[in-house]
Image: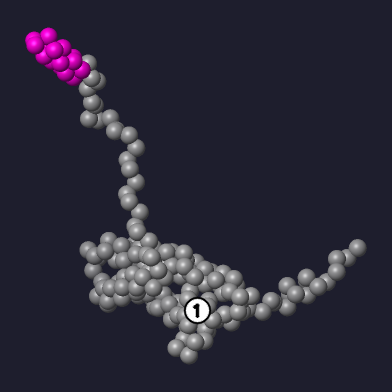
Amino acid sequence: MKTPLLITAWLLFGGIASAPAENPAAPAGPTPAPPASTPPVSLEKAMKKLAGAYKELASDLQSPQDAEKADYLTLAATIKEAADQSGAFDPKAIQVLPPEQQAAFVADYKKALVAFDAKVDVLTQALTAGDWPAARQAMEGLKEAMKAGHHTYMKAKDGTVGWTPQAPSPASTSAASTPPAG
């Protein structure tokens, strides 16, 4: 009985003694990335997230405090993230458009989201600088963009959509119809 016990002890203590000592100063490998935020499951939820952060930030900027700048930047990041997540969905108003207009509608919607993101970047720069008047002005720009976006890309109560397809510019149609010189 003593032999198996001795072998077990030798393996146990021998393995510990021969195991390389860990260097606490050495990194344990790549640092795992923080978990990505869970994207909303619908356009409506993304927009609610955006609206909530917008309302809170608009209220906070009525009497901003330098000590709260990090919170303001977090709210701006939430606005941007929700706008970016919204681009993964097609507006429901697409359903009332003829099939031949739907692709242009979605393309215009995505362009509007890119423009909105640029406005959020302006807001973020103002917040970072602590330029509260510029931040409030940027918030007004976001408010106007949201109003225009809702008018253009949401289905109205009467079932219509504010979006209209863009006609090709005269320069592009005349250039396309002019035969090449030769």
**Residue ID at (20%, 17%):** 15
What x and y, as percent, mark residue 131? 34, 68
Residue 138 in view (yes/no): no
Q: Magenta-highlighted stretch: main secondary structure? A: helix
**Residue ID at (38%, 65%):** 41
What x and y, as percent, mark residue 157? 45, 88
Q: Is residue 6 left or right of residue 79?
A: left
Residue 36 in view (yes/no): yes
Local crowd size for mark 1, using a 10 Å CA cut-off: few (<14), some (14–19), many (≥20): many
Question: What is the basis of the colouring in this image?
Answer: one colour
Dividing the image into 4 quarters, which one contains the C terminus?
Answer: bottom right
Residue reaching furthest to the left: 2
Secondary structure under the numbered disc 1 in the rendered image: helix
84 or 77, which is in the foreground?
Answer: 84
Q: Is residue 89 left or right of residue 51?
A: right
Residue reaching furthest to the front: 1
- The answer to which image quadrant residue 36 occupies is bottom left
Residue reaching furthest to the right: 182
Is residue 112 covered in magenta?
A: no
What x and y, as percent, mark residue 140? 39, 78
Residues in magenta, as a range? 1-17
**Residue ID at (47%, 86%):** 156
Residue picked out by circle 1: 93
**Residue ID at (34%, 57%):** 37
- Give the vertical position of 162 relative to 176 (above or below): below
Name the residue type under label 1. Answer: Ala
Dividing the image into 4 quarters, which one contains the N terminus?
Answer: top left
- The answer to which image quadrant residue 20 occupies is top left
- The answer to which image quadrant residue 31 occupies is top left
Counting the numbered discs, the total is 1
Residue reaching furthest to the top: 3
Is residue 11 covered in magenta?
A: yes
